[in-house]
Amino acid sequence: MQDPKSVVFRDGEDFPSQFRQISSPRAGLGFLVSIAFFACIVLLNIVRDNQLYAAPADSILATLLGLQLLSTDAAFTLLAALLAGYLGYRQFSLSQLPFLSYNGFRSANSTLDKAEGQRFYTVVLRNGGGGPARIRSTKYRVKNVDGTFCYGSDYAAVMHFLGEKGLIEGKDFMLYRLSPGETIRAGGDWLLLEIVESVARRQILALDVAIEVNSVVGGVFSREIYCIPRRWVRQREGAAPEVGGALPTVAESPTEPLTGHPAALTGSLAPPAATAPAGCPTAQ
């Protein structure tokens, strides 16, 4: 769990950061080593055949120049084949990268217990890339209208926090878990949140999810999701959106950096400090 003093809520923008690459996919180390090896053979053959360097007879270089591992033609052929294979591998790798996006929409239908006239807000995560996205980690940031908040990767603590605020799981909301190891296939969707819209507008200031995923060819990618639209807070308070100006400063945790941005609310959303339930730190 992150030290709450290092958490800085970022609520000044309507939209989260874009899908980001944290580390690059594997570059095909075997290909690169083989290419370097055969390139050295070609270079040695050229130096020896053209007598471009006269080395002392007892030197290591003279020994290397005397080696007949492959003919120049054969080495060139293998080198060209390896280069073609490496370029093909890189193209394949790029085609297998995931791309996570999400969509929030109002609906009259839901898996939640429905009362007369209720409308629901649904958030769906989608992998629009060419390869599957394997969940590496998931972190949650929830802030209630009373100023308390919950932050961390403990799904049970988040559900407990929302329950203590009077939200009933299965009736008022359903936050679907994304555990490490879960996989969203290419072109697949993942239902992330269903919530009664009136409850969300009245009770929750922010419900954010930060996800890290791996691809099948390596690399780490991240996506930040605002499950509750920021504009709802301004609409409730009757405040007009700000145009222009510098963005708030984002501080990362020194002990547990969060993918995307750590969450905290600033500006008109900043309430007095309050206590959070067990397992969830409190902003200071």
Image (tube, rainbow, N blue to C red):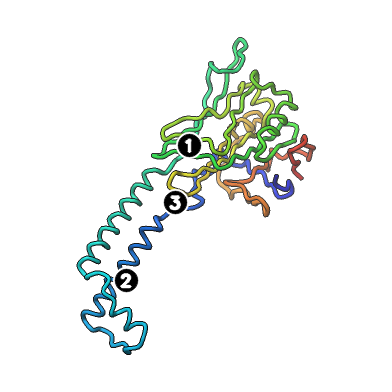
Q: How many marks?
A: 3
**Label 1 sits on residue:** 101
Residue appearing at x 68%, y 47% in the figure: 8
Amino acid type indicated by mark 2: Cys
Contact, mark 3 vs mark 2 (Cβ under 8 Å): no
Using the image, determine if residue 248 lies above or below residue 191: below
Q: Residue furthest bottom?
A: 56
How many C-alpha atoms fall within 10 Å of the one at disc 2: few (<14), some, or many (≥20)?
A: few
Q: Earlier in the sequence, mark 2 or mark 1?
A: 2
Q: Nearer the viewer, residue 66 or 276?
A: 66
Q: Position of residue 195 (x, y in %)?
A: 61, 23
Q: Which residue is mark 2?
A: 40
Residue 136 place in picture, x, y as percent: 55, 42
> Residue 22 placed where, x, y %?
51, 51
Q: Foreground residue, 104 or 167?
A: 167
Under mark 3, the amino acid is: Pro
Q: Quadrant of residue 224?
A: top right
Secondary structure beneath dot 2 equals helix
Relative side of 221 to 155, left or right: left
Question: What amino acid does circle 1 point to?
Answer: Ser
Q: Earlier in the sequence, mark 3 or mark 2?
A: 3
- The dot on residue 25 is 3
Image position, residue 16 (x, y; %):
55, 41
Could you tell which of marks 3 and 1 lies nearer the N-terminus? 3
Q: Is residue 226 above or below residue 8?
A: above
